[in-house]
Amino acid sequence: MNPCLAIIDPNTLSNIALRSVLWDVYNNVEVYTYGDMDSFIRDSNRHFVHFFVNSDILFKHIDEFETLKNQTTVISVGPDKKFSKAGFNVLDISLPEDELMSKLLRIQLVSRYEVQHGKTSRLKSSSELSPREKDVLRLMVKGMINKEMAETLGISATTVIFHRNNICEKLQTRSIGKLTIFAVLSGIIDINEI
């Protein structure tokens, strides 16, 4: 059984975007979206490992989530210090995608579930990558373009493209989110460097 994540937000576009990012960041998750608390409560037969809740909804239903702080992330537009001071994770959905991915990695919501249930990630081994491919991946995750990577590594842009293609083929993804997760979990890059 895959871990289930709940998004409770009246904004349909926000739900779709966040669901897409979560699918990009985490393997084997089921993401369910709800427009309000009533529809979420009606579908309470699932075992959710994490909740993403609109700040207004959380404010109105704080008692429901008070004991689930570690499993709840508040969805906000812009920084929301009152919820972070109260002990909740806060996800500012106005952040650029790479910062959003970094924030989601820090939350580590699915990896806790996998450890508790004895599941292992489907990520490939970092030993499948050559040392140069690891260098290129590290710079990709930092957001560098081909020319910048070539200058940093002292190789041609064509060689950088060759390594990028090899990395994507070996890891079977071109998603920068999944590549970032692989790099962090494999120890190729520290999350604080992103």
Image: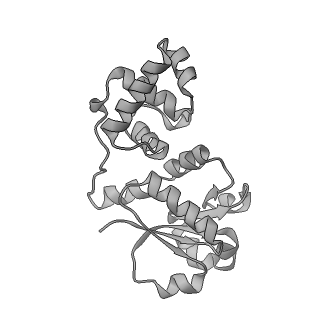
Asked if residue 51 is positioned above or below residue 132 in the image, the reply reads: below
Residue at horizontal 27 percent and vertical 57 percent from the top: 119
| Quadrant (top left, top right, bottom left, bottom right) of the C terminus | top right
Asked if residue 193 is positioned above or below residue 9 in the image, the reply reads: above
In the picture, measured across the screen, residue 185 lies left or right of residue 56, that is left
How many marks the image carries: the answer is 0
Asked if residue 15 is positioned above or below residue 64 in the image, the reply reads: above
In this view, which residue lies farthest toward the front?
158
Give residue 43's position: percent from left, percent from top: 46, 84
Residue at horizontal 37 percent and vertical 65 percent from the top: 3
Give residue 94's position: percent from left, percent from top: 69, 54
The colour scheme is one colour
Give residue 34's position: percent from left, percent from top: 55, 77
The image quarter containing residue 47 is bottom left
In this view, which residue lies farthest toward the top?
154
Asked if residue 146 is positioned above or below residue 11 in the image, the reply reads: above
Q: Nearer the viewer, residue 17 or 81?
A: 17
| Quadrant (top left, top right, bottom left, bottom right) of the N terminus | bottom left
Residue at horizontal 43 percent and vertical 38 percent from the top: 184
The image quarter containing residue 2 is bottom left
Q: Nearer the viewer, residue 167 or 83?
A: 167
In the picture, measured across the screen, residue 90 lies left or right of residue 157, that is right
